[in-house]
Image: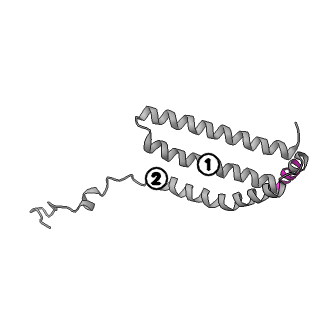
Amino acid sequence: MATKASGTSIMRTPLGQMRGLGSARSGTGVWWAQRLTAFALIPLSLWFVCAVIRLAGTPRAEVVHWAARPWVATLLIALIIATFHHLQLGMQVVIEDYVHGEKNRLATLLVMKGAVLLLALISVIAVIRMAVGPM
């Protein structure tokens, strides 16, 4: 590699030219959070599918009684939170990659996050109402 008199290089490799121009690790946290929620969703989803199969054909009152058990309600709420957080993380990546224009991207992200939060809250409240009974 040729050098100037001051000791700095004139020619640099493509990797050397790109160093410092990356994403500054902004996507690393989202990537890890997606992996953690996906990992949590595996046993929670398997448990939920098995429970739904076992409860198929059961009267509504029995299903509500089943869901009112503390450990079942806790697992249902954990499933809801993990599912909607995973959904939000995935949609955020898609929106950031494919929605052009800063204002459009910000508006789309806000609407998506608001909708996901609203749906998650409705779901959690439904589980809590089953757990504590009619209000």
93 magenta-colored: no
Q: Residues within 10 Å of mark 1 (few under 14, many from 20)?
A: many
What residue occupies the far left of the structure in this picture? 5
Q: Which disc, if any, is residue 31?
A: none
Q: In whole angstroms, how far apart are the C-alphas of marks 2 and 1? A: 16 Å
Q: Amino acid at mark 1?
A: His
> Toward which corner of the image does residue 100 lie, by quadrant?
top left
The percent position of residue 59, horizontal first and vertical second, equals 90, 48
**Residue 68 shown in magenta:** yes
Image point 71% across, 58% down: which residue?
44
Q: Kindly report the secondary structure that dominates the magenta region of the rendered protein.
A: helix
Residue 98 as seen in the image, left or right of residue 38: left
Look at the image and give the residue range highlighted in magenta. Answer: 64-70
- What residue did someone put label 1 on? 85
> Image check: 6 left or right of 44?
left
Q: Establish if 128 lies above or below 39.
A: above
Indicate the amino acid at tag 2.
Answer: Gly
* Residue depicted at 12% across the width and 64% down the height: 3
Q: Position of residue 45 (x, y in %)?
A: 70, 57
Residue at image point 79% right, 45% down: 127
Quadrant in which residue 51 is drawn: bottom right
* Image coords of residue 125 (percent x, y): 77, 41
Q: Nearer the viewer, residue 34 or 48?
A: 48
Kindly identify which numbered label has been placed on residue 27.
2
How crowded is the residue under tag 2: few (<14 C-alpha within 10 Å), some, or many (20+)? few
Could you say which is closer to the camera, residue 65 or residue 28?
Answer: 65
